[in-house]
Image (spheres, helix red, strand yellow):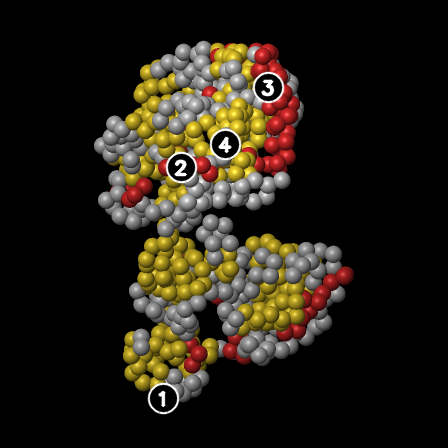
Amino acid sequence: MPAPKAAAPSAESDASNQASNASAQNPSSAASSAAASSSSSSAAASSSSQSKPEAAPAKNEAASAADTPAPVTDNRYVSVTDKNAVLYADLNGTKKQEGAAVYQRTFKSQAKYQKDGVTYLALYDANQTLQGYMNQASIKVAAGAGGVWTNASGYASLTKPGQDVYGNLDTKQVIKKSDDVLDNTYFISGAYHHLDGQVYYSLYDSHNNWLGYMAGSGFETVNSAEGAWAAASGYAKVVDKNYAIYNSFKFDATGSTDHYYQQYFKKVGQYHHVNGAVYYSVFDLFGHWLGYVNSAAVQNVTIANPEGTWQADDRYVTVTDNRATLYSDFNWTKKQAATDVMLQTFKSTGKYHNLNGLTYLSLYDKDGNWRGYINQQSITAGVSDGGAWLPANAYTTFTAANVNAYADFNQQKVATSGAGLVNQTVNISGQYHAFGGVVYYSIYDVRGKWLGYVDASQVKTTSSAAGLWLPHDGYLTTTQSGQMIYTNLDSFAGGRTTTANYQRTFRIMGEYKHYNGATYYSLYDGNGNWMGYLNSALGSESKEAQGVWMNYNANVLITASNAALYSSFFNMTRDTSSLYGGVYQVSGKYSHVNGTTYYSLYDGNRWLGYLASWATTPYMDYYDWTKPSQSKPYPDVNMYPNLSIEVDIAKQRVYIKNGSTNLYTMYASTGIDNSTPRGHFAIQTERGYSFYNANEGMGARYWTSFLDHGVYLFHSVPTDANGNYIVSQAKMLGKQPGSHGCVRLTIPDAQWINAHIKVGTPVYIY
């Protein structure tokens, strides 16, 4: 820490010091000096009492030489101490100078005059030239030519060689040269405005030892104790662990030399503090300013090539650290931030093993321009002009046959032709930012086969394995039941199944060529509601809104007299008024995107046209679906430990069995188009009183799940949105399939299973 500042000497002590010095060198002047000191005291008293500018001598234009007062010999040094003092050119009040022009100047008074009750001094400069006349009240008598002591503070940095240091300002006795104390900093504790026109300062060190007087032009004045900045260069090695590193000369430590022991600092300046210590302004070897450190903590060293010697390098490197910097020299002059060249590939032609322990590469771009030095830790080296392999995880779908994948980075050798890639989604597992400026993706198919490098500017990427959305317009009729309609092609989350939408026709509005090799259509219903994504293999596509023709053979009763008959969709030929109540044959059907199923209607061999299915009802005998299937009581399940349920799809029957013994037979209606799953299952926990499926337009009562937890059920004959049983559907019971995969039962049969059949009861469907 800096030593405490020496107390500034008082005016009296410094003036006495000067007077004593003068007497010692000229004993004959001691008496006159004492007298001058006495006069000085009275003059000071007079000066201190003055509060406003002095009055000028009265002018009298008629005055003659006889009116000029007689001079009285004077031989004193005086300093102007009145800020408002006036120097007159004559004793008639003619102003020559005033105020700051004469304030604190020292003169030789050689005569004094009394006029109008005021004493005026005739003031001479160092060349014995009369400067003018001044009211004695504006001055203070000095002990010698140095003038009177005036207050001054601050710090003096002795940065100039060959300057004189005086021990006495009257005799100008030189006691040393500034060379003896060059670069040291001293306290300024007073000033003297000498007769010779210069200002001399009284200087002390931090131990209150007086150095002497120096002219202000002989040193650099600063406002803080560290002194003036001085140049310093080169390197210093930390040899002492016990010094602080400061970020200002308030001596607030921000580090310690212990952390840098035996390491090197780069010096960029120095300060010779008034406390006697020299502080270096230092950087670490990475170009970071650390602060100020006491020179006693380090040892100056000479290092010829701190950047290291150039070594040949011949590599392609890619910048992979966005925190790095490109330097124009090893003084760490920033040339370019790495963020501007991030992921660019350069040619490294040389390298330097720096004193800081790091290796720096000399980089050139593809046009041969030198780009700067970069820390080797900020790059990743490549094995070719493609640069470094960089990780990537994305997908792209090839939509044009003219985009090839190459086996090199010069696009000279084709690895996979565009014709072999079109309509395929591939995985991007890496990328190369080639020296030539082109970015290449490294692509693989779903089997892990490498397909080549593709120019990134020729493809679009996506994070989804579904690939890119591609336009596709058409209609799809679902042809398989029990399949998922997805809402997300990455997680394959599902919202609907084709069971509830079996043989429905949807609008295709786009497609995805998924990475897994499947094509998924984006489907909408006739009202424009998005349904989800469906594998294109699970339906048949048509260009027309009615969908595809589906085989269907049945006899139907015409139940509407005003329904339209179409010869094509939708070219109406007649209505059903003449057919009402008749039974006709159906030999096929269409499930239109508008949600209506249309039958291809025949009368024998004569085709009548297309008729909406809602205008008909199946024509057949039916069982009473409001009563139990048999007149005997239902079995007591607690009496049969080996109870099971069997469903015979061919006979449309359900059997309640104990082992091989049949206990009860129920009428059933299973799924149309074999949509009821076959196999061994078991009663699940899910069951309830009723449900309604808006997508199917029907619900049921007394439902009990046996598969997929609420998807495949035993339940009653169907109900409509108002909870009314749908008679046309109920009449199919025991006769033909009618559900979308569930097993329909009479109302009492469904209620009994719901109430009595236990969870885990085996179910066998065949």
What is the number of the mark on residue 578? 1
Disc 4 marks which residue? 70
Q: Secondary structure at mark 1?
A: loop
In depth, the one of 569 and 765 nearer the eye is 569
Q: Residue at x 44, y 84 (%)?
A: 559
Residue 413: image location, x then y, percent:
24, 32
Select label 1 or label 4 by which is in front. 4
What is the number of the mark on residue 32? 3
Residue 508: image location, x then y, percent:
36, 62
Determine the CA span between mark 4 and mark 2: 89 Å
Tell me which label, 3 or 2, sits earlier in the chain.
3
Select label 3 or label 4 by which is in front. 4
Q: Are marks 1 and 4 in contact (CB under 8 Å)?
A: no
Of the residues shown, which amino acid type is indicated by label 3?
Ser
Q: Are marks 1 and 2 in contact (CB under 8 Å)?
A: no
Tell me which label, 1 or 2, sits earlier in the chain.
2
In depth, the one of 128 and 423 nearer the eye is 128
Determine the CA span between mark 1 and mark 2: 82 Å
Of the residues shown, which amino acid type is indicated by label 2?
Thr
Select label 1 or label 3 by which is in front. 3
